[in-house]
Image (cartoon, helix red, strand yellow):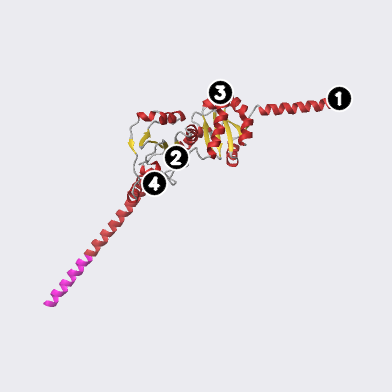
Amino acid sequence: MFREYFFLLLMFFYCGLLTDLIKSQTLEVVTDNELLDLCRSENQVVALFTLKDCEKCKKYEETLTQIREELVDSLNAWVVKVEGSNLVHIYNPAKEPTLVMFRHGVPLLVPEPEAVNDEFLIDMLLNTEILLLKNLMIIVLNILPRHQQEPQQAIGLLNCNYSSDSIECQRLQARWETVGAKLKNRVNVARVNRYIGGSITARRFAISQSPTFILLRRGVMYTYTSTDHTIESFIKFVEEDYKFTVKGQVPQPKSTFDDFVHMCFDVIRENPLAWKLGLTVLSVILLCLAALKTTSKSSEYKSKKKSTKSSSKKSK
């Protein structure tokens, strides 16, 4: 009897070990809503967006599973998997498989070469966190500092409206964070939001479209005109393709008056209905004034005519 109980306990023990082993070799599956909750509540979340019966996705998952324990120990990160997500297109237009690291809710897209190599992947994710702590990832600029009027080190400016009105900018954010991570200590990668704080810089560089990419290097400005908004294309442009781009002069800061005039033109251009309504109201006011002036003149004329008649009668 004792042997049977002992054998039963031994089986439960081995089943528990087997269950733990299976769990350690697979990632926890979460829904889109659960992922959003994790990103809001946790500092570090590594999410793998996958599809069922996808061989490439399995390779991503195997690589991530191998380094999961180290990510948990080093970063206290949540490592999860999302199957058939509706959010993946926001971070990567190529969709699944996609690996994204959320740092305090900010997404960073992990490129495929790193995502399928455990050594490259752990190196990138750990270094990204170190850079984030040193504030070396993405610089948020409102006004370009004076010492950067003729920068000796390249600085990339991303002008983008980070709101629900600009889906393209939201999609670019994860890729732009990766560009900042890959160009660390070589190029100062920055972003400017012309709708929040960065309007003066946007007017200085005559930026009217979002997103707009500019490279400043040794006092020369190069505008990125390609429609290819991949991580590789941005890095290639900074490293070599800028040489084949038309050089432009870095504009000087505008005076207060010139900046105010430019701002007025921007408001008129971006709000056509508002200025048309204002023009209509102004036209109505001018017409009313003209009508009042005409009525006043007519009244004066009648009054004069009446007084002339009465004076002529008196003289008789």
Q: Secondary structure at mark 4?
A: helix
Q: Nearer the viewer, mark 4 or mark 3?
A: 4
Q: Nearer the viewer, mark 4 or mark 1?
A: 4
Q: Callout 3 environment at 10 Å: few (<14), some (14 to 19), or many (20+)? A: few
Q: Position of residue 289 (x, y in %)?
A: 28, 59
Q: Spatial distance from mark 4 to mark 3, Cα to Cα? A: 46 Å
Q: Amino acid at mark 3?
A: Lys
Q: Secondary structure at mark 1?
A: helix
Whichever of callouts 4 and 3 sits on the residue coming sooner in the sequence is 3
Indicate the quadrant containing the C terminus: top left, top right, bottom left or bottom right: bottom left
Q: Position of residue 60 (x, y in %)?
A: 57, 26
Residue at x 87%, y 26% (from the top left corner) = 2
Q: Spatial distance from mark 2 to mark 1, Cα to Cα? A: 70 Å
Residue range corresponding to the magenta coloring: 298-316
Residue at x 18%, y 69% (from the top left corner) = 304
Q: Amino acid at mark 1?
A: Arg
Q: Callout 2 environment at 10 Å: few (<14), some (14 to 19), or many (20+)? A: many
Residue at x 33%, y 34% (from the top left corner) = 247
Q: Identify residue for label 1.
A: 3
Whichever of callouts 3 and 2 sits on the residue coming sooner in the sequence is 3
Q: Nearer the viewer, mark 3 or mark 2?
A: 2
Indicate the quadrant containing the N terminus: top left, top right, bottom left or bottom right: top right
